[in-house]
Amino acid sequence: MDGVYDRRAPKRDITLSLDEDILHRAQSLPGDLSERVEKMLADEVAKADRESRLDATIAALNDFDARYGSFADDHLDHL
């Protein structure tokens, strides 16, 4: 496993419907279109994973705060 996904996993042919203009423009760029699309999808998956972990962390911290109170609350009286 390398980062977000297993780069050694077998490739699979799929069918996509893309805007003809953007497809034509993307095909004129250097490099392999499939590799570029795969990288963009990997970036989106990584972003979604980060957001999911952040949401879970925030929920856990809020739960901890609701159960035990905030560490800061014990020290705010001194300010």
Image (cartoon, rainbow, N blue to C red):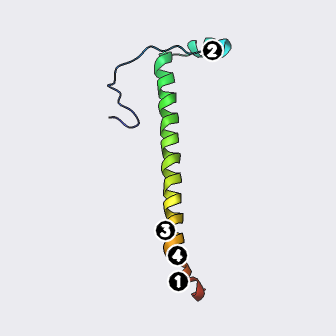
| Image-based side of 35 in relation to 79, left or right | left
Residue 25 badge: 2
Real-space Cα separation, disc 1 to disc 3, in angstroms = 15 Å
Sequence order check, earlier mark of 2 and 3: 2
Quadrant of the drawing holding the C terminus: bottom right
Check if mark 2's residue and mark 4's residue have beta carbons within 8 Å: no
Query: Which amino acid type is marked by label 1?
Result: Asp
Q: Which residue is mark 4?
A: 69
Seen in the picture, residue 51 relative to 62 is either above or below; the reply is above
Q: Which is nearer the N-term, disc 1 or disc 2?
A: 2
Report the number of discs.
Answer: 4
Q: Dot 4: few (<14), some (14–19), or many (≥20) neighbours within 10 Å?
A: few
Q: In terms of secondary structure, where does tag 4 sit?
A: loop
Tag 1 near tag 3, CB within 8 Å: no
Instruction: Give me the residue at 34% from left, 35% from top.
Output: 2
Q: Which numbered dot is residue 74?
A: 1
Q: Is residue 31 visible?
A: no
Q: Choose top left, top right, bottom left or bottom right for residue 22.
A: top right
Q: Is residue 12 above or below residue 54?
A: above
State which tag comes first along the sequence, 4 or 3. 3
Answer with left or right where residue 10 lies relative to residue 67.
Answer: left
Amino acid beneath label 3: Phe
Q: Are marks 4 and 1 in contact (CB under 8 Å)?
A: yes
Q: Which residue is mark 3?
A: 64
Q: Residue at x 48, y 39 (%)?
A: 46
